[in-house]
Image (tube, rainbow, N blue to C red):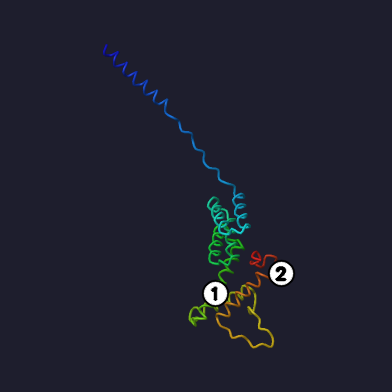
């Protein structure tokens, strides 16, 4: 009799456990969010830029860069926008992100070169006005001007006009001349017909 009672209790407990498990609600699986397409994200950022919402466009490009870390397109847009806005420090940082993904990108190298020159020229001008342009800074500025002449294939960066006294050379005027020469190439000069890609700054026109 006792055996029957024990078995009955076991069966009752099992039945209760089964009924409780059957009453439990099964939670549906949450589907992973679908990542937007690269083209769609870039299009949204471009629309914001066209509408004059510069910082919103930058934010959208950065979101695109996070979603597609291997693609350089978002950083190309950011670097170009920063450069166009005269934000040369930010333009250089963004251009370096391009080079991480494509070391041979000419636009990125051009933005870094020109933005760096403009920042350097500005700083050299400030130092010159403070009468603090001397020593190693002066020497390095002259070396930079020499490197620019060699890179551009020019004997002098800014030819002296006829019937005018030569301008006394100093590191500030040399740096300004270097920046002006590169700026002229960016804005107006065209590469020789035989070498259409000779000017690395053509993409910034």
Task: Determine whether, in the image, residue 202 is placed left or right of residue 6.
Answer: right
Spatial distance from mark 1 to mark 2, Cα to Cα?
31 Å
Front-lying residue, 166 or 61: 61
Q: In which quarter of the image is the N terminus?
A: top left
What is the crowding at mark 2: few (fewer than 14 residues within 10 Å), some, or many (at least 20)?
few
Rendered view: 129 above or below 194:
below
Helix, strand or loop at label 2? It is loop
**Residue 63 vertical placement versus 178 (above, below):** above
Q: Mark 2 points at which residue?
A: 192
- Residue 122 position in % (x across, y down): 54, 74
Q: Residue at x 60, y 74 (%)?
A: 179
At a point 64% along the width and 67% down the height, the residue shown is 201
- Residue 126 position, x and y percent, is 52, 77
At horizontal 49% and vertical 81% (from top left) the residue drawn is: 130
**Which residue ends up furthest to the right in the rendered image?**
193
Q: Which quarter of the picture shows residue 181? A: bottom right
Q: Position of residue 155 (x, y in %)?
A: 64, 79
How many labels were placed on the picture?
2
Q: Is mark 1 on a helix, strand or loop?
A: helix
Q: Are marks 1 and 2 in contact (CB under 8 Å)?
A: no
User: Quarter of the image containing the C terminus?
Assistant: bottom right
Whichever of labels 1 and 2 marks the residue nearer the N terminus, that label is 1
In the depicted view, which residue is nearer to us: 112 or 49? Answer: 49
Residue placed most toward the observer, 60 or 113: 60
At label 1, counting other C-alpha atoms closer than 10 Å, the crowd grade (few under 14, some 14-19, many 20 or more) is some
Give the foreground label among 1 and 2: 1
Q: Where is mark 1, residue-wise? A: 122
Tell me what residue is drawn at x 54 percent, y 73 percent.
120
């Amino acid at each position: 009799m006792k055996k029957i009672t024990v078995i009955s209790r076991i069966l009752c407990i099992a039945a209760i456990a089964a009924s409780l498990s059957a009453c439990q609600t099964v939670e549906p699986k949450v589907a992973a969010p679908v990542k937007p397409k690269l083209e769609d994200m870039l299009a949204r950022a471009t629309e914001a830029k066209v509408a004059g919402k510069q910082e919103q466009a930058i934010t959208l490009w950065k979101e695109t860069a996070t979603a597609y870390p291997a693609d350089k397109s978002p950083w190309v847009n950011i670097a170009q926008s920063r450069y166009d806005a005269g934000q040369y420090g930010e333009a250089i940082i963004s251009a370096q992100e391009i080079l991480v993904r494509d070391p041979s990108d000419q636009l990125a190298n051009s933005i870094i070169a020109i933005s760096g020159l403009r920042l350097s020229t500005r700083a050299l001008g400030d130092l010159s006005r403070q009468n603090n342009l001397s020593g190693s800074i002066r020497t390095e500025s002259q070396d930079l001007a020499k490197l620019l002449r060699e890179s551009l294939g020019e004997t002098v960066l800014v030819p002296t006009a006829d019937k005018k006294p030569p301008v006394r050379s100093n590191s500030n005027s040399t740096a300004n001349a270097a920046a002006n020469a590169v700026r002229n190439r960016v804005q107006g000069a065209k590469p020789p017909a035989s070498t259409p890609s000779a000017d690395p700054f053509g993409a910034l026109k």
